[in-house]
Structures are given as C-alpha cells and as structure tokens.
Image (cartoon, helix red, strand yellow):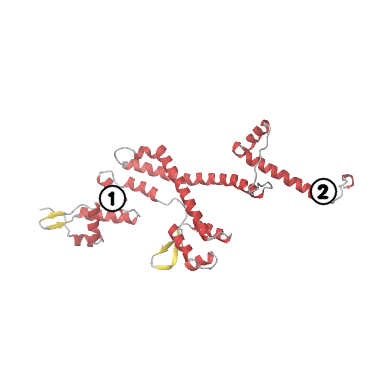
Amino acid sequence: MSDTPAYRIEDLAHLSGATVRTIRAYQDRGLLPRPERRGRANLYTDTHLARLRQIADLLDRGYGLASIKELLEAYDSGRGLGGILGLVAEVDGPWTDEEAVRVSRAELDARFGGTPDEAAVAEAVELGVLEPVPGDEDFFLVPSPQELAVAVELHAAGVPLSAISGHLRELRGQVEHIASRFLEFTTEHVFARYLEGPHRPSDSDAAEAASLVRRLRPLAQRTVDAELARAMRVLAVQHLRQHLGSGESQDGRPVSRSVAVPEETMRAVEELVGAERVAEFFALAAEREVRARKLDALTSTGRPPIDLDEVD
C-alpha cells in the first residue's frame, strides 16, 4: 500500500482554499491531473495540492487560465517556470510609468464643468478611460491620469466630450496599428530565434528574451514621441499657413503657389536645415520678410524721415 497521502476532493478543497466546483473546472480545462481511482473512490495527492497552489499563485500574478495552462505544460515538460514566468511578466508588465488613481464622481463632474453627463461617463468606461470600482459607485479608477488630463484640457478649450471620445477611438486604432507594426518588426529581427522551432524556449532562452523585452520596451514610445514631435512641427506650420494665408480659391480654401529657387540656393538651404525641412524654412523665411516689411511700413507712415546727423 502506498504511503503517499490521499485526499478526497472535499479535503483537497479545504487544504488548497479552492472550492470543489473550481477543482472540477480545473480538471475539465486540463489544468489539474485527474484523480487516482482506488476502488470506488477518487483520491488526490500532494501533487494535486501543489498544482492548485501553483495555479492560485499565477492567478494572483494576473495570468488568465489559458496562459496558466501553457505555463504549466512547459513546467511539466521539464523546462521549469522561472525563465518563462520572467518572460511573461515582462510582456504582461506595465508599459508606462503612470500609476492608476482613484477619482470620485463629484470630482470628475467638477473637472468637466460641474454638470453630470451620464452618457459621457458611460462612453469613458467603455473606452477604458474610467474603470468602475467594485462595490463603490461613487468612485472610478483612472488607469491613465495623463489621458484624463488631456480630455479635461480639451473640454476646457471648448471641445465637446462626444468629439473627444470620437477622436480617442480614431487615435486608438491608429496607435494600435503602430504598436502591431513595432511588435512585428522586433519579432522578425530580434525574437524570432526564441519563438521559432518545434519546442518552446528553454529556461535560459526565456530569461534572455525577457531581458531583451525589458531593454526594448521604452524604444517604441521614444520612437513615437520623436516622430510625433517632428510631424507636429511640420504639419502645424503648414496648417497655420493655410488658415492665415491671404490667397484663397473660390471655395475658400488656400491656394498654393510654386516659386522657382536657384539650385545653388536650394543646396545651401538643404545643407543648413536638412532636405526634409526645406519647405518649412522657405515658408518661415517668407513670413518673416513679410512681417519685417509691414513693420517698416508702419514705422515710416505719417512720420518725417529721421535726420541721423541731428542724433547725438
């Protein structure tokens, strides 16, 4: 007779802290081995108890049951959980330094003009800008305080909440495309050697991949920040020039004109500011010249010329 401790499902539930129903659900999902059949009884061992504790620990770390099943299969195949957990933790970990904050409903209404707007709150919850606090209807969790602060400033500037929500939906789709392309790019050139092949990465491979994720994680945001700054600089000048330009077509839209520039001058400007900023340079230079001439005209109109010989 075996000396291995054997437990009925009720005993296992008591020792592990899981319910009988949960244990059976784990068995159905393949997370927990089937019990041993001894006579007419189903008996569990310390192996089942250890597995239940592993599952509980992974749930506490925030993993879903599907991910837990994959991790446990890797563990059962002899590759260990250390490196794999490290890799998953890096990928699932926060990709920002922001910390979520709680905000009361009263404070939220005050920040948006003082008038409650149930439709706007519901849309913010749907978008994930606000998260209800279970058991407390008077508070919300704000995952990104910066995002909420932007919405507050836009609303204070006169942008309707519905327009802000619509803009966020559009922006989110575009940003998700950028994130997807960055992941495809890094996977192809960096992580393919860890992910390809018939077997999952070894413990050491997973640990190395986790280290790479940690190093590369900030690069996506830095790249987007730099490119957004460049695009805003170029497009903002063009946008302002279109709205303030004096030339308009019959339908009210600005008219663009082509001006011939000597090749030698063009090369000199390219060397000075770079080829991508030539148009911006000429536009700003022209605007500065126009303003200078207007100032000259204003200072000379109605005034007698100054005799420099009379100036001490």
Whole-percent x, y for residue 26 in the image: 25, 55
Whole-percent x, y for residue 233 in the image: 59, 46
> Which marked residue is nearer to the observer: mark 1 or mark 2?
2
- Decide if residue 221 is on the left or right side of residue 11: right
Q: Residue furthest front?
A: 250
Residue at image position (28%, 50%) is 69
One can see residue 278 in this view? yes
Establish if 290 lies above or below 131: above
- Decide if residue 152 is on the left or right side of residue 196: right
User: Given the image, on which type of amino acid does mark 1 rest?
Assistant: Lys
SS of the residue at dot 2?
Answer: helix
Q: Nearer the viewer, residue 173 or 150?
A: 173
Would you name the residue on which mark 2 appears?
A: 300
Would you name the residue on which mark 1 appears?
A: 69
For label 2, count other residues whose C-alpha is less than 10 Å away and answer few (under 14), some (14-19) or many (20+).
Answer: few
Residue at image position (52%, 57%) is 164
User: Given the image, on which type of amino acid does mark 2 rest?
Assistant: Ser
